[in-house]
Image (cartoon, helix red, strand yellow):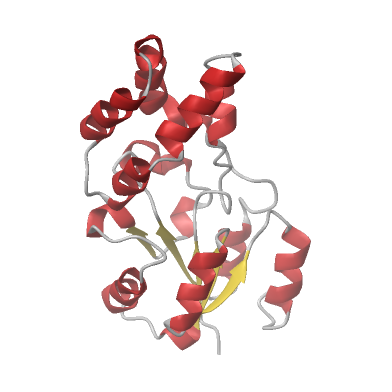
């Protein structure tokens, strides 16, 4: 029996679109490609999400790979990227609706410490029973350890949890640790149909 709904954040509850962030800083296609690749598409960004490097360390590393003329834009992006986050239509109210039906509602997200700057942007934030942020734990999806730490921290039975994430790899890892998952592709109707199988909506 499903008792708890676990949400990812980026591209589930809020729109996370690095390409759009970069386009707002430069119209040059080559610069856009370089900035997207060396910041948001880098291993360093994953380390930043995981909390194993700081933003200052990320910036230094990124700049060793970018031409000097892009250093200022890189700094701007790292300082403002989260300002471009906004709730996805129809998903913004879902946590509240599920909470009102009696489900536990949780957030399990790969997110850097910047999360604590933009946490108020989380839709229906007051409806959540708990927030589990990767950089607090030095763990990241799709590692099995982050799921196990999540279950343990909130004393949840994975068999009673339903996980919504935009990453297929994360859904597979969740299922391998005992939690049912739904691969969300910004298709609310498909999610609603799957949730309906459990009489959740």
Residue in view at x 36 percent, y 68 percent: 143
**Image position, residue 148 (x, y; %):** 32, 77
- Is 128 drawn above or below residue 2 in the view shown? above
Residue in view at x 67 percent, y 57 percent: 185
Extreme residue toward the top, this view: 69
Q: Answer left or right for 58 relative to 9.
A: left
- Where, quadrant-wise, is the N terminus in this rendering? bottom right
Residue in view at x 73 percent, y 59 percent: 188
Residue in view at x 28 percent, y 28 percent: 59
Res 154 visible: yes
**Image position, residue 6 (x, y; %):** 49, 68
Quadrant of residue 100 within the rendered picture = bottom right
**Image position, residue 200 (x, y; %):** 65, 77
Identify which residue, 127 or 4, lies in the foreground: 4
Extreme residue toward the bottom, this view: 1
Q: Answer left or right for 98 relative to 80.
A: right
- Is 14 drawn above or below residue 162 in the view shown? above
């Amino acid at each position: 029996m499903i008792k708890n709904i676990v949400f990812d954040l980026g591209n589930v509850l809020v729109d996370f679109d690095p390409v759009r962030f970069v386009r707002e800083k430069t119209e040059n296609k080559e610069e856009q490609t370089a900035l997207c690749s060396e910041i948001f598409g880098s291993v360093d960004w994953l380390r930043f999400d995981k909390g194993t490097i700081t933003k200052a360390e990320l910036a230094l590393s990124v700049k060793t790979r970018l031409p000097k003329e892009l250093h200022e834009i890189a700094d701007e992006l790292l300082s403002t990227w989260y300002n471009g986050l906004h709730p996805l239509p129809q998903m913004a109210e879902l946590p509240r609706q599920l909470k009102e039906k009696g489900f536990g509602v949780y957030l399990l997200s790969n997110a850097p410490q910047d999360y604590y700057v933009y946490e108020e942007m989380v839709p229906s934030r007051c409806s959540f029973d708990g927030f589990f942020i990767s950089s607090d734990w030095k763990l990241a999806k799709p590692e099995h350890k982050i799921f196990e730490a999540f279950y343990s921290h909130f004393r949840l039975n994975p068999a009673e949890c339903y996980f919504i994430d935009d990453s297929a790899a994360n859904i597979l890892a969740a299922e391998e640790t005992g939690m049912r998952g739904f691969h969300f592709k910004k298709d609310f109707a498909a999610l609603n149909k799957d949730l309906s199988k459990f009489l959740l909506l």
